[in-house]
Amino acid sequence: NLASSQPVEILDLARLMSRLMGKPDLEMHTTGHSFPGDVAEWYGDISKINTLGFEPQVNLEEGLAATIDWLEARAS
């Protein structure tokens, strides 16, 4: 689970992940269409946990990079 106060579009997230994984030129395709049941906007709301004093310690890119590094270290 990840969330911050900033929404991120899925395509932007996929592009960021491909760049961090060393595949910046990975070709991505979208249909350009939405489907029944698709949510127009969906993002994690951290306002409740903020009332307990929680503040994210790393940004999305830093967190994804650390997660990718962790997974790669265990894959070999």
Image (tube, rainbow, N blue to C red):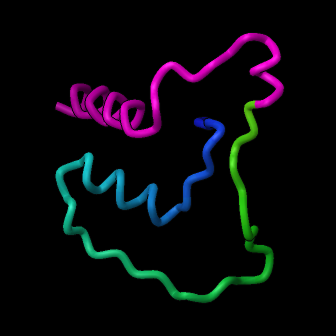
Q: In the image, residue 59 lies at what x, y percent?
A: 46, 32
In this picture, is 61 found above or below 34?
above
Residue drawn where x is 73% and y is 32% of the image: 46
Which image quadrant: the N terminus?
A: top right
**In this picture, is 3 found above or below 12?**
above
Decide whether residue 48 is among the magenta residues: yes
Looking at the rendering, the stretch of residues picked out in magenta corresponds to: 47-76
Quadrant housing residue 64: top left
Is 51 colored magenta in this rendering? yes
Q: In this view, does 28 lie to the left or right of 4?
A: left
Residue 11 x, y percent position in the rendering: 47, 66
Q: Tell me: 29 left or right of 74.
A: right
Q: Where is residue 21 in the image (x, y as percent from the top left)?
A: 24, 48
The quarter in which the C terminus is drawn is top left
- Exactly how many numbered labels are in the figure? 0
* Nearer the observer, 59 or 17: 59
In the orientation shown, which residue stands out farthest toward the top?
A: 53
Left or right of 10, for residue 35: right
User: Image point 47% across, 82% down: which residue?
Assistant: 30
Of 18 and 54, which appears nearest the observer?
A: 54
Give the dominant element type of the magenta stretch: helix, strand or loop.
helix
Q: Quarter of the image holding residue 40? A: bottom right
